[in-house]
Amino acid sequence: MKASNLAYVYGMAAVFLWSTVATAFKIALGFYSPLQLVFVAVLTSIVTLGAILTWQKKLPLLKVQLLRRPTFYLVTGLINPFLYYVVLFKAYSLLPAQQALSLNYTWAVLLPLLAAPLLKQHLRKSDMIAALIAYSGVFIIATGGDVSGFRFDSPLGIGLALTSTLLWCLYWIVNTKDQGDPVVSLLLSFLIGLPFITITLLLTDALPSFSIKAVMAGMYVGLFEMGITFVLWLMALKTATRTANISTLVFLSPVMSIGFIAWILQETIATATYIGLGFILAGMMLQQLFPRYLERKTKLNTKLAE
């Protein structure tokens, strides 16, 4: 199979699996508290990533990378998986899956806004316009379409969903300083985050149920939200002849996710969700595709001038 075709296979597999996890979150949260689900999912992900690194013969890199930058991995482990997933799962426990999903996807719009001051990157006009469009969608979803009434069904849930996007962006911004193997780095973050999760669980909650249905639901989240899917996406980006072509596949994920939510969870998808998600996707597309259009236009004008 050609490398470009193989990249699309990996990319579509990753997008498909990510599209199922919002539904999986709600199912798993029927068995577990948010903290219990984080515990089971992270354990599963650690075993999965460990097996992948064993197969790739990269396990020795764990010690090398950790000793090189222990403080760095302490910070990433605290953010992800500990803080990010506790906050995200709590948001999912308070909100309909369609709302939590849509709000969580705004991280892509928030990322360049944070990267500008934190990484000293240039903030484009298209980033600002994209943010305005996307957060208009957030407001529509949060108010259930009653934009004049300013009434929120779950202010805490909405606040947590948006906080999760902030934590996710901070995690990726911190990771721009990482020059190690990305799968090794992810496993180190999870290994360091696990003790914090375990201690918090023992002090504030109860140990999770180990019934077959509960464990299977938690393991699914660990496998396909945190573990295998991340590796598939990395393989897609690594194999692709043009990364830009693969990155556009992410626009399919929220649309497919809504389909799974309606089909499996039997949630009635509100009109406000469709409209708000449309705004969010429009913002994401403007942010990612408009600069590429300008770049191609500039190159074309340069060639014509020659």
Image (cartoon, helix red, strand yellow):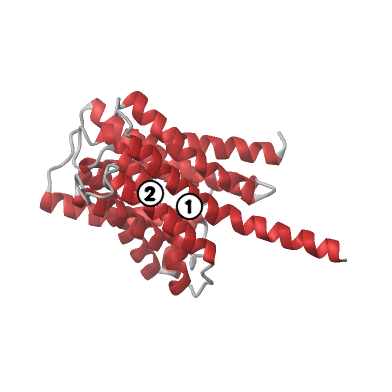
Quarter of the picture holding the N terminus:
top right
In percent of width and height, residue 161 lies at 29, 51
Q: Which amino acid does label 1 sit on?
A: Gly
Residue 64 visible from this viewpoint? no
User: What is the number of callouts on the image?
Assistant: 2
In percent of width and height, residue 56 lies at 54, 46
Q: Mark 1 points at which residue?
A: 283
Q: Return the residue found at the far front.
A: 148
Left or right: where 176 falls relative to 210 = right
Label 2 near label 1: C-beta < 8 Å? Answer: yes
Between 120 and 294, the one nearer to me in the picture: 294
Secondary structure under tag 2 reads: helix
Q: Name the residue under label 2.
A: 137
In percent of width and height, residue 135 lies at 38, 54
Between 168 and 236, the one nearer to me in the picture: 168
* Image point (37%, 62%), residue name: 76
Specify which label sits upstream in the sequence, 1 or 2: 2
